[in-house]
Amino acid sequence: MEQDVRRIIGALNECLAALPQQQLQRVSHIGVSGQMHGVVFWKREKGCKWTECGTGPAFEPEEVSHLITWQDGRCSPTFLSSLPLPQSHISLATGFGCATVYWYLKNSPDFLKSYDAAGTVHDYVVAMLCDLKKPLMSVQNAASWGYFNSRSKSWNTDILKKSGFPVHLLPEVGDPGSIAGRTTSAWHGIPKGAKVGIALGDFQCSVYSCLTERTDAALNISTSAQLTISMPPGFQPPETPDPSSAVTLRHQVQESAIYTKIIKAALAQNDSKLSVHPTIFGERHVPEQLASVTNIAVSDLSLGHVTRALCRGIVENLCSMLPVQRLVEMGVRRILGSGSALARNEVLRQEVERIFPFPVVYGKDVDAAVGAAMVMFHRK
């Protein structure tokens, strides 16, 4: 669950180099988004070097750690329970930036001494583009790290200092949509001086790209699954976490040569008495509650029965975390369905329509990059 930042930035450079130069030269604003929760460490003065390539200047990482992703599992429940309680609406979980820093503080303190800056990988990109002397992080990414009070928009500095946390690594925090700085160099044809937005969370940008009505709920089932609604104006999150609250659900949807046959078998079975709880990787609010299968009978062990029950379990689990009654109370009138799993899996679509008593619209484009660009467009 560690990734090479050099390869990530290399891929980013390749993508930009492949875009039309005439279009890149017209860019005035850059919106950035990326996977939340994870953490990268670097040295402020030596975080990257700029070099010339075929399409113009590009930056390459120098004294930078690996990216420790949101899927990192080094922080056990026992370790997390030993940490101070955050003043935040989000419970701490393994893979969160602050939890990872605590792990290094206990298990490899010399590692932290090698760096004087930290952020998400997309915060790193913004810092390099703008040559920021101190990293700048949006409240979205800060909340995803833990130990951040979303009401006061501030880190739990007092709590962190008392436990010896290296607070000098924490980035400054700004509002989504704000400008972090300007490009200090041309970048693959993008002019020097282009405004760069503060890095945003991929999930928020994905929702922003499609959720046009407050009465819509967004359902995405792909490499992970989320059901999302807009909160009313003036909503404020609580200042303390509810450990039992369902925050997110993680499923892995694997590609397979027999995928089509599996779906065909499940379509032949309209029902299954099998009950599948499919959280094989756990959930952040109950990491110890793993997958289970109940009501097992010989008559329901065919491939079609099992697949039907699995699809139903995925949707039912989402519904249990954000129940239909809550959606009705929030004024939801329609569900926008997206994601590769929903697009390819008719059985999943059937189960969504069976469980949720709202019209379901499929095929709505959900794209974090588009959402980030839209934020910067409205900023203009």
Image (cartoon, grey):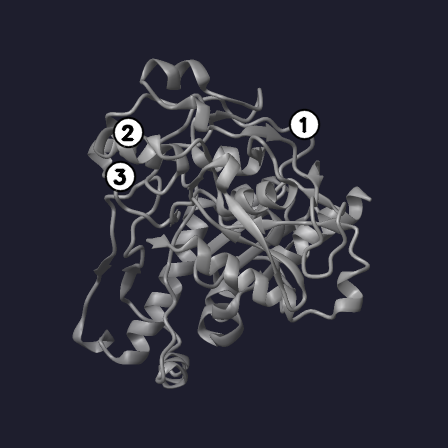
| Residue 146 lies in quadrant | top left
Image side of residue 265 versus residue 151, left or right? left
Name the spot of residue 345 as percent of width and height, x first. 47, 74
Give the distance between the C-alpha atoms of the residues marked 1 and 3, in whole angstroms. 35 Å
Residue under the image location 35 percent in, 84 percent down: 258
Image side of residue 374 versus residue 2, left or right? right
Residue under the image location 40 percent in, 80 percent down: 263
Give the distance between the C-alpha atoms of the residues marked 2 and 3, in whole angstroms. 12 Å
Residue under the image location 57 percent in, 22 percent down: 151
Please give the residue where the numbered disc 3 appears in the rendered image.
75
**Amino acid on which the number 1 mark rests in the picture:** Gly
On screen, residue 159 above or below 190? above
Q: Reading the chain from its start, which is encountered first: label 1 or label 3?
A: 3
Q: Residue furthest front?
A: 52
Image side of residue 135 versus residue 313, left or right? right
Front of the two marks 1 and 3? 3
Name the spot of residue 380 as percent of width and height, x first. 82, 44
Name the spot of residue 171 as percent of width and height, x first. 52, 30
Q: Tag 3: Cα neighbours inside 10 Å, few (<14), some, or many (≥20)?
A: some
Q: Reading the chain from its start, which is encountered first: label 2 or label 1?
A: 2
Q: Tag 1: Cα neighbours inside 10 Å, few (<14), some, or many (≥20)?
A: few
Please give the residue where the numbered disc 2 appears in the rendered image.
105
